[in-house]
Amino acid sequence: MNKQIVNVDFDFSEGYTDSQGRELTAKVRLSVDVKSKTFNVAPSSIKKDFVFQNTSQSNWQMWIATAKAIQNAVQFAAEYLKDLEEPATDGTV
């Protein structure tokens, strides 16, 4: 039997404090298509897109945390895909 990873998902989060002093977490989901060597970063909630509009003083910290989570996801994806291209050095396939 031949097994192959085709798609893999990773969740990234970044903590922040909102304008009311609450500790909250911004979350994004990284989806990697191993076969095509591409990736998507999307909100990990039911929303499909990021929309930076009508941002107010009350939620700017959320957007900063979201941007950091996106940056971490993109950097991870680039390294993950790079590692897929390099042959294993520990004897594994």
Image (spheres, helix red, strand yellow):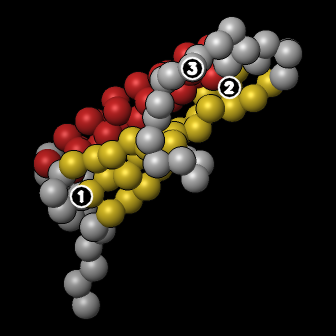
Which residue matches tag 2?
Answer: 15
Q: Amino acid at mark 1?
A: Val
Which residue matches tag 3?
Answer: 54
As drawn, the residue found furthest toward the bottom would be 1
Residue count near mark 1 (Cα–Cα under 10 Å), binned few <14, some 14–19, many ≥20: some
Residue count near mark 3 (Cα–Cα under 10 Å), binned few <14, some 14–19, many ≥20: few
Is residue 58 at all visible to an observer of this figure? yes
Which residue matches tag 1?
Answer: 34
What kind of element bears circle 2?
Answer: strand
Give the left or right position of residue 71, taking residue 23 as reference: left
Of the numbered discs 3 and 1, the one sitting upstream in the chain is 1
Q: Out of 63 and 29, give the one closest to the viewer.
A: 63
What kind of element bears circle 3?
Answer: loop
Position above or below: 41 against 37:
above
Q: Amino acid at mark 2?
A: Gly
- Nearer mark to the viewer, of 3 and 1: 3
Q: Out of 45 and 87, give the one closest to the viewer.
A: 45
Kindly indicate whether the residue at mark 3 contacts the one at mark 2 (C-beta within 8 angstroms): no
Q: CA distance from mark 2 to mark 3?
A: 22 Å
Q: CA distance from mark 1 to mark 2?
A: 29 Å
Q: Out of 25 and 80, give the one closest to the viewer.
A: 25
